Every structure is written in structure tokens, then in C-alpha cells.
Image (spheres, helix red, strand yellow):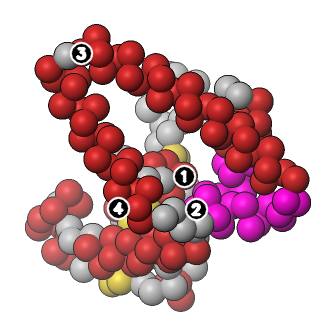
């Protein structure tokens, strides 16, 4: 599993991928696991170790499931990897690049008023306390909250459609790739 932020989940899942000589992005590496029909692929840097027919990565670069790729390439010391193993190899620099990408996604997203965020946080803490002390009451409160959020989401999605925003603006405002943003808005409009 790669890196995920709590807010975006797998919409912006990051990982330390490979960079070939000259910074080229390699094709996925497939690993035959035997007789099953599933042949998994990997794009992480360690899959490009030069063994067999695999190319040798010269560095690692941050990648994101949304399609973003870091510009910077961070060198791999394969001699050290041979000593420490891939699991102990430092991926902090690509991680920092990906975290900067997430900060940029956040900066471009629609701003939720801080007062509302504070109320949501306070409400969440109260619900968590209630779940510990009075679980049935907490479930009733969650049911009421689900109804409220479904009505609000439906109204916002319809208003968004009436505003006629382009898909790219909606995606940036939600901090999601375009396809996921379209799916989310449609789901809200249909009340699912």
C-alpha cells in the first residue's frame, strides 16, 4: 500500500516509483505468481532492480494515482539496498514531494469556512464520546446525520449543475481527479 491522506484516500494514493536513466518513466513490471489468471504488476522503485529482464532504476520519484508525477528524481544507492533491503531504504524525499503535491491539491480546493470545520470537529468528538457511553444514542444521531448530509449533498450537487462549472473546476474544487469528481457529484445528485 502506498501513501494516503485521510481526506483524499485512494484518489491521491502516492508511492515511490522508479525513474530510469534520463528520468524516463518505466512500464509496469509484471510478476507471474504461478497458475492463477491474475498477474500482478508493480511500479515501485524496488521492482526495477536490473535482475532478469527488468530495467535498473537510477532513482526514485513520487507518483500519485491521480496522474501527477514529481519532477525531481532521488538517486538510489543499490549497494546500500543490497545491505539494508528495500524495506529499510529511505523513501522520505519522494514522500516529501508527494506531501507537497497534496498541499497543492488542498490549496486549490474549495475553502470550507473555518467555523464550520470547527463545528464538524466538535460534533465528531461528541459523537465519538457518545459511541463509547451510549452506543444506541450514537447510532440514532448518526442516522439523523446521514439524512442531513444526503439532503445537503443533493442540494449542493443540483446547485453545482445549475452553476455550469467545467469538470476541471469541479475536480479542483473537490480535490479529486476529474472522473472521481464526476462520479461523486452524480452520486450526490441521485441521492445514493
Residue that carries the numbered disc 4 in the rendered image: 46
Name the mark nearer the viewer: 1 or 4. 1
Residue 119 vertical placement versus 90 (above, below): above
Residue 62 rendering spot, x and y as whole percentages: 44, 72
Residue that carries the numbered disc 1 in the rendered image: 11
Report the side of 20 relative to 94 (left or right).
right
Report the side of 102 relative to 177 (left or right).
left
CA distance for labels 3 and 2: 33 Å
Residue 173 rendering spot, x and y as whole percentages: 64, 64
Name the mark nearer the viewer: 2 or 4. 2
Name the mark nearer the viewer: 1 or 3. 3
Span shown in magenta: 163-183
Between 68 and 23, the one nearer to me in the picture: 68
At 25% from the left edge and 73% from the top edge, which residue is drawn? 92
Q: Secondary structure beneath disc 2?
A: loop
Q: Secondary structure beneath disc 1?
A: helix
Residue that carries the numbered disc 2 in the rendered image: 175
Amino acid at each position: 500500500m502506498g501513501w494516503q491522506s485521510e481526506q483524499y484516500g485512494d484518489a491521491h494514493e502516492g508511492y515511490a516509483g522508479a525513474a530510469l536513466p534520463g528520468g524516463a518513466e518505466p512500464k509496469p513490471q509484471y510478476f507471474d505468481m504461478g497458475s492463477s489468471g491474475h498477474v500482478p504488476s508493480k511500479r515501485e522503485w524496488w521492482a526495477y532492480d536490473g535482475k532478469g529482464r527488468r530495467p535498473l532504476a537510477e532513482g526514485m520519484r513520487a507518483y500519485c494515482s491521480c496522474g501527477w508525477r514529481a519532477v525531481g528524481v532521488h538517486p538510489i544507492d543499490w549497494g546500500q539496498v543490497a545491505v539494508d533491503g528495500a524495506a529499510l531504504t529511505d523513501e522520505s524525499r519522494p514522500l516529501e514531494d508527494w506531501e507537497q503535491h497534496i498541499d497543492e491539491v488542498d490549496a486549490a480546493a474549495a475553502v470550507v469556512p473555518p467555523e464550520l470545520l470547527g463545528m464538524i470537529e466538535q460534533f465528531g468528538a461528541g459523537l465519538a464520546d457518545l459511541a463509547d457511553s451510549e452506543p444506541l444514542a450514537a447510532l440514532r444521531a448518526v442516522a439523523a446525520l446521514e439524512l442531513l448530509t444526503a439532503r445537503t449533498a443533493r442540494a449542493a450537487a443540483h446547485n453545482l449543475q445549475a452553476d455550469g462549472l467545467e469538470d476541471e473546476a469541479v475536480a479542483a474544487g473537490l480535490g479529486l481527479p476529474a472522473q472521481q469528481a464526476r462520479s461523486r457529484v452524480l452520486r450526490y445528485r441521485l441521492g445514493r
